[in-house]
Image (cartoon, rainbow, N blue to C red):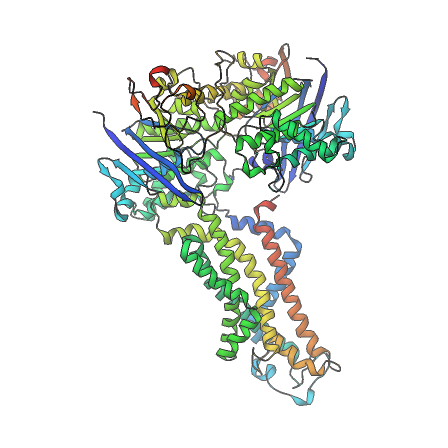
Amino acid sequence: MSKKELLKIEDLSIYYITEDGTVKAVNGIDIKLNKGETLGLVGETGAGKTTTALGIMRLIPNPPGKIMSGKIEFEGKDLLNIPEEEMRMIRGNKISMIFQDPMTSLNPVMTVGEQIAEVIEIHQDLNKQEAMKKAEEMLELVGIPAARVNDYPHQFSGGMKQRVVIAISLACNPQLLIADEPTTALDVTIQAQVLDLMNNLKEEFNTAMILITHDLGVVSEVCDKVAIMYAGEIVEAASLKQLFENPRHPYTLGLFGSIPNLDEEVDRLKPITGLMPDPTNLPTGCKFHPRCPYGTDICAKQEPKAIEIEDGHKVKCLIYEGLVDAEVKR
Amino acid sequence: MTSNVAKGTMTVEKKKNKKRSQWAEVWRRLKKNKMAMLGLAILTILVLTAIFADFIADYDNVVIKQDLVNKLQGPSAEHPFGTDEFGRDIFARMIHGARVSLRVGILAVGISIIIGGTLGAIAGYYGGKLDNVIMRVMDIFLAIPSILLAIAIVSALGPSLMNLMIAIGISSVPSYARIVRSSVLSIRDQEFIEAAKAIGANDLRIILKHIIPNALAPVIVQGTLGVAGAILSTAGLSFIGLGIQPPAPEWGAMLATGRPYLRYAWHVTTFPGLAIMITILALNLVGDGLRDALDPRLKQ
Amino acid sequence: MADKILEVKNLKKYFKTPKGMLHAVDGVNFSIERGKTLGVVGESGCGKSTTGRVVLRLLEATDGDIIFEGKNIRMFDKRQLRQLRREMQIIFQDPFASLNPRMTVSEIIAEPLIIHGLTKNKKELDKRVSELMEIVGLADRLVNAYPHELDGGRRQRIGIARTLSLNPKFIVCDEPVSALDVSIQAQVLNLMQDLQEELGLTYMFITHDLSVVKHFSDEIAVMYLGQLVEKAPASELFKNPVHPYTKALLSAIPVPSLKNKKERIILKGEITSPINPEPGCRFAKRCPHADKCTNANSQPVLENIGNEHYVACHMVNKLM
C-alpha cells in the first residue's frame, strides 16, 4: 500500500444559515487520508458526519448551507477552488458516494444495468454497448449474476440493491469512496455480506474510503483509522488499534459505555447523560462539557486544542492539555 | 437527504411553558410570505366591508332605490364609481355585493367541505366496499362539468341565495372527498393511530381526535382556493340569470346588467369586474401562501 | 411451575396478498414468566412485530391460543378487550410516528386516562400526568410542548409514559430503541429496566439488535420466516447457539472490540418469501448444512436439549 496522501482537509467549517439561526454543523475539522486507507467517521445524529461528506463532494445544498472556511485538498488540488465543471468530472469518477438508503438512491424506472452504464458513459470514453458490457462486469463483481442486468430495482431485495449501488459507485474505479451509513438499513446477516464485499473490493481496487457510521462494531470490522465527531468537531482521531484499546476522550468512552457488550454482563449500561447540544446555540469552551463527567469550570471557558498524545492519536480535551486534573478511564 | 444533519438537530427545546402549536408555526411562516400577507390584508378589508356594509351605505335608500334621473353617470365625488342604469350608486351596491359574494363563497365551500370531508374520511378510514361505493359515486359527479351541475341544481330548485350555495357546494363535493380520502389513507397507517387503538380508543375518537386534525392542512388550502372558485361560479350563474335575483346587488349580476352599456358607460362593468378579480387574486395568494406554510418540506 | 403471565400456543397469522397467503406467523409457541423479559429477535420480515401485535390483539390471529393470566383472550369480546388494554400495552419503535403531532405532551399522556375514565376530575388528571412525566424523566416544563419540538429520546419517553398510564402488567416493546442514537438508547434501556424492577413489569422485547437483546432479556427466542427456530435463556443462547441460523446471526454482529474476533459465518442469499412457503424446513435454502440434512422436506419442531434450551432443527444432534 503506497503511503501517498490522497485527501487532506484543513479547518473545514460548514454552517447552515436558517431562519431559526445558524446551525454550526461542522466546526474546523482536519482529516488526512492516504491512498487505500479507510477512515471511520463516527458520531451520533447531528454530529456533522453527513455534512462533512457532502462538503467533500461539494454537494452542500446552498442555501441554506455554506462552507465558511477551510481547504479540501484532493490529489493536491483544493476542491473548494475549482470550477463546478471540473468538480462534476471528479464526482462519481474519482470520488463517489454511497448513500444510506439503497431503496431511494436507485431510479425506479431505469434498469440496474442502465444505471451502472450511465455513470460509465459520463466519465469514460465508451459507447453504450461497451458501457453495458462493463456494467455486467461490475454486477458480477458485486456478486449479482450478469443475467440480471436488465432487471429493475424493485426486482431486487434490499441487500442486492445496496450491491447495485456499490457497483455504480465503483464503476469508474474511484480513488475515494465515501459511504454514508451503507449498511444501516440492512439486516445483520445481509450487513455481514455487504461489509465482506466492501472489504474485498477495497483491497482489490486499493480504494480509499471514508465510512460514515454510528456503529463502532462496523468500524472495527472495516476501518484502519477512526475519527470520532461530536457537535461538528473531531474530538478524537486515532488508528483503529489506538482508539479501541486506548480511547481517551470522555465522549468516546461514553459511546463505548452505551453499547451493550456481548462478552460481559452488566446490570446497567453507562449512558452519557444529557442530550446533543442545540447546533444553533453550541456551548462555549469545550462543546462536550455539559455532558462530560469530568467537566470543570475551565471547560466552559476554554476551547480545547487537538493534542497528539501518541503517534497519530489526537484528542481534543483539556485533560490532555494539563488544565483539568482527572484520569479518564473506562 | 439534503440536510439530515441540520434537520436532525433542529429539535430545539423550547424553554417556555407555553403552547406553541403547529398552527402557530404555520402562522409564523405565513407571515414571512409578503404576497400572502397582501392577499390577507385585501381579504380582511373585504370582510370588514361586508360586515359593516349597512353603516357605509343604507340598503333600502341607496342600494336598491332607483333614481332614474341620475342613471349611468360616470365616477364623481358623489358617486365614486358612478351610477348604474337605474341611477343606483355602484360603490354602495358593490359594498353590499361583497356581503353576498363572500357569504356564498364561504358557505358553499363550507357545505362541500362538510359533505365531501365526511364522505372522504369514511371512505379512507374504512376502505373496502364502502370506499369503492363512495368513490365511484364521486367519480360520476366528477364526470359532469361542475358549472353544468350547478346550473342543473339551481334550475331544479329555483334561483335563490340558499339554492345557489347548495348548488355550488354540491358540485365541488367530489374534489374535497378525494383530498380528504387520500390524506386519511396516509394517516391511517401511521403508528400513532395504532397507538390510539392500543390504548382502547374507539373509531369515532380516532377519526375525530387523531385523523381529522392531521388531515386538515390540504383541505384548508383547497378551501381557500375553493372560495375563489365559488365566488366566480356565483358571478357566472348570476351573469346568466340563475344566481342572485334583482334588485339584490351581486358582482356577477352587476356585470351582466352593465353589459349593454359597455360602450358608453364603462364604469358599470369595470368596477364589479375589478372587485371580482382582486378578491380572487387575494384568495389565491393566501391559498398559495398557506400551501407553502403548511408544507413541512419547505420549512427551511 | 413458574408463574406464567402469557402463554401462546400454535399462534398463526396469515395475510391475504395478491400473490397468495403470506405466512407472517406460522405456528409459534412460547410463554413468558411474570416479571421477566422475553427477547424476540430476527431479521426484517420474520414476523416478530406481527407476533407482538397479534398477542395484543391489535391484529386478529388466524389460529392458535393466547392465554393471558389464565384466560384465552382470543375469545374476548369488545368490552373485555377494552379492559384488557389496561393490562397489556405496547411501546412502539418510531417515536416520531407513534405520537400524534397535533397533541401536546400532556394531552398524549392523558388520553388513555380519559378513555378509560381513570381519574375523577381535571385536577386529578393533571396530577397523574405530571406523576407519569416524573417517572419517565420528562421535565415538568414540557407539559405543553409538542412532539416535534423534542428529540427522539424524549419522544420515546412520552410513548413510555402513555403506555404506563394504564398501569399495565405486560408490555410488548417493539424495537423501542432502534430509532435512537446510542447514548440515548442506553438512557432509555436503563429507564425501562428501572421500571420493570419497580413496577414488576413483564416485557416481550422485539428487536433485531442482538447486543441489546442479550443485555435486556432473561430468555431469547429467535424467529425465522414466521417460526421459532431456537429459544433459550439469554446467556445460554449466546454461549451455546445450536441452530445454524442462530449461529450465523450471532457471528454476523459487528463487535466493537478488536479482541476475540470470531470467524464470521456469511449466509448465502437472503430471507426467502413468506408467501405460500413450501413445506419443510424454511431455512434449508440458506443452511450451510443442508446438503447433509436428510430430512429437509419435513418441518422440524422445537425440541428441548436441556437447560431450557429449545432448538428446531433436524441436525440438532450432530450440531451440538
Q: Quadrant of residue C125?
A: top left
Q: Residue B169, image x and y in percent? A: 51, 68
Task: Name, please, the residue furthest toward the bottom.
Answer: B69
Q: Residue A61, image x and y in percent? A: 67, 38
Query: Is C14 in front, or is C50?
Result: C14
Q: As drawn, is B290 to the left or to the right of C209? A: right
Could you tell me if residue C131 is visible in this image?
no
Could you tell me if residue C123 is visible in this image?
yes
Give the residue drawn at x 46%, y 37%: C94
Location of the N terminus of chain A by quadrant is: top right
Vertical relation: A313 (above or below) C66: above
Q: As drawn, is C85 to the left or to the right of A49? A: left
Q: Quadrant of residue A75?
A: top right
Q: As drawn, is C293 to the left or to the right of C149? A: left
Vertical relation: A292 (above or below) C23: above
Q: Residue C40, image x and y in percent? A: 37, 29
Query: Is B171 in front, or is C108?
Result: B171
Query: Is A27 in front, or is B212?
Result: B212
Query: Is A17 in front, or is C28?
Result: C28
Vertical relation: A188 (above or below) B85: above
Give the residue drawn at x 33%, y 37%: C12
Q: Residue C111, image x and y in percent? A: 37, 46
Task: Name, please, the residue furthest toward the left.
Answer: C1
Give the residue drawn at x 31%, y 28%: C198
Task: Name, please, the residue furthest toward the top.
Answer: A310
